[in-house]
Structure formats: C-alpha cells, structure tokens
Image: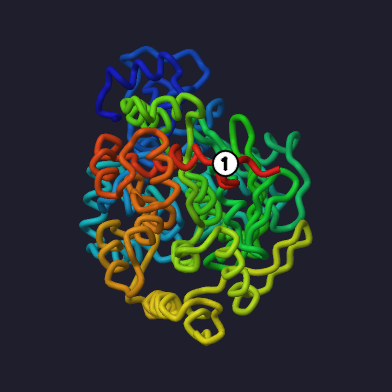
Amino acid sequence: MHTDTERCVRAVQSKDARFDGWFFTAVLTTRIYCRPSCPVVPPKVENMTFYPSAAACQQAGFRACKRCRPDTSPGSPEWNARADVVARAMRLIRDGVVDREGVPGLAGRLGYSTRQIERQLLAELGAGPLALARAQRAQTARILIETTDLPIADTAFAAGFSSIRTFNDTVREVFALAPGELRTRAAHGKLSQAPGVIALRLPFRAPLNPDNLFGHLVATGVPGVEEWRDGAYRRTLSLPYGHGIAELTPRPDHIGCVLSLTDLRDLTHAISRCRWMLDLDADPVAVDGRLRTDPLLAPLVDKAPGRRVPRTVDAAEFAVRAVLGQQVSTAAARTHAGRLVAAHGVPVDDPRGGLTHLFPSPRALAALDPEALALPRSRRTTLTTLVGALADGSLRLGIDSDWDEARDHLVALPGFGPWTVEVIAMRALGDPDAFPATDLGVRRAAGGLGLPSTPAALTARAAGWRPWRAYAVQYLWATDSHPINNMPV
C-alpha cells in the first residue's frame, strides 16, 4: 500500500487508525517516522514519504515518533492473510527466529537460500531479515526498559542483542533517547512487578468482538493448561528458552497482557504467540466488508462485527487436540486432553492461579502406550501416527507452514478427514480461508439461515466469502447458544 501515495496521504490527513501497521509515514524535515493515526498536525504533503515497515524507516535514517510510538502499532494484516514466502518469513521473524537461529535458520525453515530470502524481503519491505529483526529487538528492548527493573546490561541480552554497545546504539538511533532516559521517562507510571513478570498492552484494529474469541478458548480449554480467572484467560506456554504463563484480559481498546517468564529472552516469542492466538493483526474492516456482501451473512456481521478466529499458541498441540475432539463433545475432548496432560505434561508452578502443566510435546507423547488411551482403536491409531510424524519431523506444523502442503501431509495420515484438516488449517496454521464445511455447527447454522446445508453445496455457496471463509465460520457458529460463543463469566 505504501506505493499508493494519494491513498496514504488521505489516511494520514484523516488520522485513520485502520491503516496503522499497513505503512509508516516518514517526515523529511524532522527525520521522524509515525503511524498514520499520529495525533500531531499532519506534515505538508511534499514532506511525506511512505515505507512498508518500521525497519525500512530506520534503515533510511528516521527515528520513531515519541507521540504515536509507531513501534507499538498492530502488525500488518497482510502477513497473516498470505501463504507466500515473504509472509511466512515475516511470521517467523516476528516469532524471533532470526534472533535464535540467524538468517540461515530462517532460510532453512522456508526451503530457500539466504540470498533469495534477502532479495524478496528487500523488494517488498525495503529491509532485509537482519534489519527487520533489529527493529523488533528494539521494540522488545523498549518494553523491557519501560516495564521492568531489569539492569540495562541484562535487558540488552534479554532483548536479543549480542552486545551492550549495539543495544545502546540501536536504542538511541531508533528512539532518539538513551536506554536510561527511556526508563526515566516511563518510571512515573511503571507498575511494580515480580521478577520475570512483564505487563504490557497488545494493540489491535477495531472493532474486536471478544465474545467468541475468549469464549472458544475457555470453553475448549484443557484443565491444568488453560483457565479463566478474574476476567482473564490464562494458559501455560512452552517457549524456546524456558516456559511461561500468559494472562490476557479483554479491554475496550487493547488486550491487557501479563507474561510470567522463566527466561526473559522468550519475551518476543511469547508476545508473538499471544497476538497470533487472539488474531490481533487481522483487518476486521476488510473481513467484515467482504462478508457483508452476502445478504444472508450481513445481519450477523452487523449485529456483532469484528469477530476474530481463535487460534492456538502451538500448532502441534492443537493438531493433537483436534484428533481427540473427533466425533465427541467439547467436554469429552477436554477430558481426553486433560488426561494426556496429567500423565505426560511437564509440571509448572503457578502462584497466581490453578495452572499445573505444560501441554506435552510430540516427543513426550510418542512414548505413550496406545492401550492406555480411552479411545476407539481407530482413533488411537490416528493419534499415535500423528504424534510419531510430529516427533520425527516428517510432519511439520507451524506459522511458517505452506497451507496447501500441510493439508496434503495431513490427508495422507490415517483418520484425517476434511473436518480435522480444515479445523487445523483454520486454528493452528492460521489460513483465513479455511472452511470446515462438514462441521455440524456450520451446517446447522447454514440451514437456519437459508444457506445450503450439504457440504458440497455450502462450499460452492461460500465461494463469495473468499478469502475470509474462516471468519464466516465464526459468524455461523455464533448463531448457536454454545458456550464457545459467549464471554466467560
């Protein structure tokens, strides 16, 4: 979008928050870059230039605005709506892969050479993977500086920097303030937190309807791994350097987030996982606009706009849970998952609530005895084959998955039909166009609205909802009184 100068200028002059994260405005006279909704008086048109990423602005010598804090704007919705290599690379960079594995690790996950990855990111985003990761490290550093009492030297390494000098230079360049000055400016409003506990806000594009989002996560939550407590959804997280607990509270203009981490180097990954699970980078205006073109869906969208797709923090975990949920009730699926967690999950300490375990990894589940599972024999075979494929790496599921390729691999496994594959594509892989046409709730809702209720006819009718059929599913599900559609109490 940053190449459409006229459209960008209109967005800046109207301070349209819908475009935050889509592009950034750099002011040639002040050498500052802002989000489109910056509250200051818009600069003259001839002094504006536009970039597709904060990293591109920083590479061009611009520093972040202190008023609108463009580094904290929602991420571009484009990266979650596409499955090409650039979008997959951006999802991995946002997850901290470059910090942990370097550019060769990023390229290896995507099956491309480092030169190809750098060339494609530069062409579309104006910055290579190192610059994009650097911009993200700067944002993580700012969060740690402003919300914790961690010594500055420890903050540098926790944010992913390899040296204190690089950390100091980056913070000064990006924010025009030294790390100590940033902490002093934020000190008056800082809350006292226990060691390893970080409180922050997760921004989103309005509107956001939290009912089905939190309702689904809580109604299907695994005992010991997830809970609803004091108005917040809480769950344990398996992270690259340790583990953590996320506490997420819906607010009118943001999601309150409290992270308890055993290793602060996991902060970037934990934030990314939480944003992904709540689908916070979605563009509800684009989604709802397309769905409103169907006269049978329009009343549902108008009644409660801004529904998101409830996702997961771990694709492998969700795949296991999807198999456990085949042809059984939500309560039965929770019971089966809870037994797996109690038997094979890693215990954790939760002084603030009732969380007890991490969900077991595929490697841990690969050692389970199939005869100990209270499941039909065919489903035992499906589950053990799945965890075996996940454990040995022959099946890889994650935010970087190619959606069509992942579907092909899943279909090849025994016991994986259209419902299981599409639910995994929708909630674990993040495909916004996934469509479980055989789902009983979808078919029941479709029949009630006057839509075709047979899978083939409904799939043909839903072609007009593309590429947002996963969001249409949320509106269809919402016609039922099931707990997944209601905010927990």
Q: Residue at x 40, y 56 (%)?
A: 423
Q: How many numbered markers are drawn?
A: 1
Q: Residue at x 27, y 17 (%)?
A: 6
Amino acid type for the residue under numbered disc 1: Ser
Measured from the top left, where is residue 65 in percent x and y?
Answer: 50, 29
Q: Decide: few, some or many residues near mark 1? Use Cα within 10 Å; few <14, some 14-19, many ≥20.
A: few
Residue ID for mark 1: 481
Is 251 on the left-hand or right-hand side of 123?
right
Chosen colour scheme: rainbow
Instruction: Name the foreground residue: 394 vs 258.
Output: 394
Q: Nearest the camera: 326 or 107?
A: 326
Vertical comparison of 377 with 313: above or below: below
Q: Residue 18 versus residue 214: which sits nearer the camera? A: 214
Quarter location, residue 100: bottom left
Q: Quadrant of the C terminus?
A: top right
> Residue 250's spot in the image, x, y percent?
63, 38
Relative placement, left or right, of 19 versus 433 is right
Residue 85 vs residue 414, the one in the foreground: 414
- Residue 24 visible somewhere in the drawing: no
Report whether residue 451 is seen. yes
Quadrant location of the N terminus?
top left
> At numbered mark 1, what does the secondary structure look like: helix, strand or loop?
loop
Left/right placement of residue 132 relative to residue 108 reads right
Rendered location of residue 204, percent (x, y):
51, 35
Q: Residue at x 59, y 35 (%)?
A: 254
Q: Is residue 321 above or below residue 189?
A: below
Coordinates of residue 167 in the picture (x, y in percent): 53, 51
